[in-house]
Image: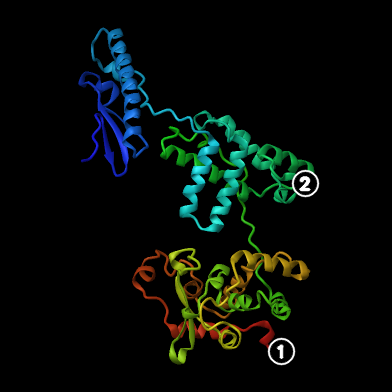
């Protein structure tokens, strides 16, 4: 038998309080007081119903007093009187406690890279305002937080002296050690994640409105993309023959796959299509997900990659068992330190190089989009091809891939 509470009902897994106001007061108060009790436990719901019943009686008493002061007449002027705020069950949760809850929530829906960025923003907020109850957060706290974010150095976390410091201390240390500050784009990202946390608190019923909603980072974000690899840099990368990255570099240069897609490739995702050669099926698997639905695709393998498969890569399981995105990033950073010519480039430059070669050989943009897993802009209204076409054929894909030439293979 299901539990029943007076003035409360259960919707999905959450108890909702609803109690109708007297009809003569409804022109002022509205039809009913309705409030989520933010619990699925009947005992907690019963206690919170009792609290809201007290608040309900206070609202009725105040409304009656207003009516009495207006000679007991329900005139149109009464409707213009200040309306009553719907009460909430007072939250005593601190900002730090809610930051921890939000991180648990985010960890279930975000991938590791995105979660790492959110965790950094929440750590800064926790260190700065963690002891303050969330209901006491004001716009002034937001302005102070924005000021500190704007003073942070990109490298402050790398200093030993920064261990255990909060946002204010990190900002002071940044000013002492360096003249540089975070780019506007990074400041925007941190601030947006903090604001998203407060929006989540609103949805959870911990606060009524986001007190930082009106605040913004002053400087406009200007993306500074990494450089496209030059043919000379590509030749240098291949001549280095790095044991950890050589195979991944070849895949990036000759297929345009992202580092995460390469690290998660499985041997059984390499399929043969007769005289068209072998193809890599890029799809979600037990090792990694994909960036978007458009990233799910089938890519022809360059003859150079087919040689690599036959000569050096496993016949089952993962093609690169020891490779992760983190190892790719750190491995490429070592190459960059070893070879100053690579300064300003990252592993993602292999994907940019591949796309550049497609453009220089006259491949239509929507063909390239199909190969690299971008949302195709195949028509001005994004309707005819995007919704009705099955995409380019495997033979067309093969023709594009076979035109790609690595610099070391180009003869003078």
Q: Which residue is rendered at x = 71% and y = 74% of the image? A: 233
Q: Secondary structure at mark 1?
A: loop
- Visible in this render: residue 168? yes
Mark identifier at residue 303: none
Q: Secondary structure at mark 2?
A: loop
Q: Which residue is rendered at x = 45% and y = 74% of the image? A: 297
Mark 2 — residue?
A: 178
Residue 388's quadrant in the figure?
bottom left
Q: Earlier in the sequence, mark 1 or mark 2?
A: 2
The single residue placed furthest to the bottom in the displayed view is 275
In what quadrant of the picture does the N terminus appear? top left
What is the distance, in whole Å, between disc 1 and disc 2 at their CAs?
48 Å
The answer to whether 310 is drawn above or below residue 336 in the figure is below
x, y (%) of residue 123?
A: 60, 44
- Visible in this render: residue 35? no
Depth check: give the residue in front, 13 or 220: 13
Task: Describe residue 127's horizontal placement relative to residue 107 as left or right.
Answer: right
Q: Which residue is rendered at x = 42% and y = 79% of the image? A: 392
x, y (%) of residue 299?
A: 49, 78
Badge 2: residue crowd in 10 Å (few <14, some 14–19, many ≥20): few
Mark 1 — residue?
A: 412
Colouring scheme applied when the structure was drawn: rainbow
Badge 1: residue crowd in 10 Å (few <14, some 14–19, many ≥20): few
Depth check: give the residue in front, 397 or 258: 258
Q: Which residue is rendered at x = 31% and y = 23% of the image? A: 53
Asked if labels 2 and 1 touch by Cβ distance under 8 angstroms, the answer is no
Task: Describe residue 263's horizontal placement relative to residue 173 as left or right.
Answer: left
Residue 38's quadrant in the figure?
top left
Q: Count every numbered label the image shows and give the total.
A: 2
Labels 1, 2: front one: 2
In what quadrant of the picture does the C terminus appear? bottom right
């Amino acid at each position: 038998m299901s539990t029943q509470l007076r003035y409360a009902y259960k919707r999905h897994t959450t108890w909702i309080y609803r109690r109708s106001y007297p009809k003569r007061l409804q022109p002022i108060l509205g039809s009913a007081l309705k409030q989520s009790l933010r619990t699925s436990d009947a005992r907690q719901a019963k206690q919170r119903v009792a609290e809201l019943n007290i608040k309900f009686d206070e609202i009725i008493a105040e409304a009656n007093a207003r009516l009495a002061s207006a000679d007991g007449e329900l005139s149109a002027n009464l409707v213009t009187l200040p309306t009553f705020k719907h009460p909430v069950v007072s939250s005593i949760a601190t900002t730090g406690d809610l930051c921890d809850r939000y991180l648990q929530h985010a960890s279930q829906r975000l991938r590791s890279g995105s979660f790492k960025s959110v965790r950094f923003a929440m750590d800064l907020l926790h260190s700065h305002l963690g002891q303050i109850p969330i209901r006491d957060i004001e716009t002034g706290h937001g302005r102070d937080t924005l000021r500190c974010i704007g003073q942070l150095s990109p490298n402050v976390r790398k200093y030993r002296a920064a261990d255990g410091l909060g946002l204010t201390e990190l900002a002071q240390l940044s000013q002492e050690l360096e003249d540089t500050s975070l780019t506007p784009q990074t400041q925007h990202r941190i601030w947006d994640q903090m604001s998203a946390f407060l929006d989540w608190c609103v949805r959870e019923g911990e606060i009524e409105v986001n007190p930082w909603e009106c605040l913004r980072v002053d400087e406009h974000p200007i993306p500074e993309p990494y450089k496209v690899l030059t043919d000379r840099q590509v030749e240098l990368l291949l001549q280095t023959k790095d044991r950890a990255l050589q195979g991944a570099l070849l895949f990036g240069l000759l297929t345009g796959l992202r580092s995460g897609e390469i690290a998660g490739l499985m041997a059984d995702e390499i399929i043969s299509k007769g005289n068209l050669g072998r193809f890599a099926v890029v799809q979600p698997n037990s090792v990694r997900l994909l960036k978007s639905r458009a990233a799910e695709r089938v890519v022809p393998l360059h003859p150079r990659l087919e040689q690599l498969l036959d000569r050096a890569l496993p016949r089952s399981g993962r093609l690169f068992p020891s490779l992760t995105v983190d190892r790719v990033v750190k491995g490429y950073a070592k190459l960059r330190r070893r070879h100053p010519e690579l300064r300003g480039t990252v592993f993602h430059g292999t994907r940019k190089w591949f796309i550049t070669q497609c453009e220089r050989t006259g491949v239509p943009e929507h063909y390239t989009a199909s190969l690299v897993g971008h949302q195709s802009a195949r028509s001005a209204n994004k309707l005819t091809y995007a919704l009705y076409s099955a995409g380019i054929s495997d033979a067309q894909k093969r023709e594009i891939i076979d035109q790609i030439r690595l610099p070391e293979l180009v003869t003078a």
